[in-house]
Image (tube, helix red, strand yellow):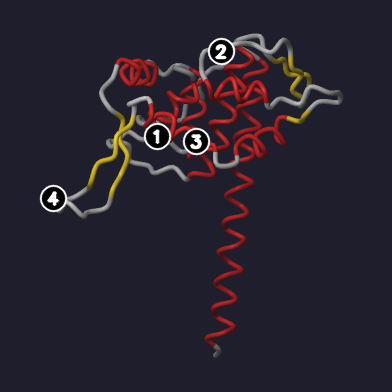
Amino acid sequence: MTTAKDLFIITMDPSSKHSVGQGDLSLALAGAELIDLIGADAVAVDGDRIVPGELPTLDDRLMDQAAAALTRQAPYERIEDWLWRRGEDLSAAYQAALEEDGELARKRSGRLSFGSERVEPVDTPAHRRAADRWREKEPVLAALASVVGIDDDGSDDEPGLDDESVTTVVAVVHDAVMELEAVRQRRSIENAAFANLWRGP
């Protein structure tokens, strides 16, 4: 399993107190892919740019797609631009892939057979590995989960990342999620103002 898949599984945990927006999660998944590509020596980070190396075979189709999508011409792509480009609808792609692999299953909430449907992790070895990684507060997974608002113990301690490139990626993911939230708030204010205009005094 990849960091992105582990992150997706953690966010789907029914015991989690926080729901994660698809846009936030998509940005974090793109960041997780980039961190795994750094770990596989498939890319390096130079300032705020992603410098690709050899095209690796990663034994994961979504990661292979991520590697193939890298910009391979100088001046190369900025991390922020990669997150927005690669992150588009990425949470839906991960959900589909994990359902196909039997890692997620659809369940109905409530006792009625026509109740609303939700997706939950299946108890598989991969799910248990993700849960172990989360329980052990593995720094990269904990940092990305924190960015999207998941922190099961409420601790204010920042997870320690010992790689400067990884730290840079997590920081850019955080900024992108904050930017997305600012856009949401601005739209909400504009919509409320528009509704009030039509409602009249």
* Cα distance between the residues tagged 3 and 1: 15 Å
Query: The N terminus is located in which quarter?
Result: top left
Local packing at callout 2 (Cα closer than 10 Å; few below 14, some 14-19, many 20+) is some
* Cα distance between the residues tagged 3 and 2: 17 Å
Q: Are marks 1 and 4 in contact (CB under 8 Å)?
A: no
Q: Is residue 159 left or right of residue 53?
A: left
The residue that disc 2 covers is 58
The amino acid at mark 4 is Arg
**Residue found at x 59% / y 76%:** 194
The numbered disc on residue 93 is 3
Dot 1 falls on a residue whose secondary structure is: helix
Of badges 2 and 4, the one in the foreground is 2
> 75 or 173, which is in the foreground?
75
The amino acid at mark 1 is Thr
Label 2 or label 1, whichever comes before in sequence order: 1
The residue that disc 1 covers is 11
Local packing at callout 4 (Cα closer than 10 Å; few below 14, some 14-19, many 20+) is few
Local packing at callout 1 (Cα closer than 10 Å; few below 14, some 14-19, many 20+) is many
The amino acid at mark 2 is Leu
In the rendered image, which quarter is residue 20 located in? top left
**Residue found at x 52% / y 13%:** 59
Label 1 or label 4, whichever comes before in sequence order: 1
Dot 3 falls on a residue whose secondary structure is: helix
* Cα distance between the residues tagged 2 and 4: 42 Å
* Cα distance between the residues tagged 3 and 4: 29 Å
Q: Residue furthest right?
A: 74
The numbered disc on residue 111 is 4
Of badges 3 and 1, the one in the foreground is 3
Whole-percent x, y for residue 5 in the image: 45, 25
**Residue found at x 21% / y 55%:** 114
Label 3 or label 2, whichever comes before in sequence order: 2
Dot 4 falls on a residue whose secondary structure is: loop
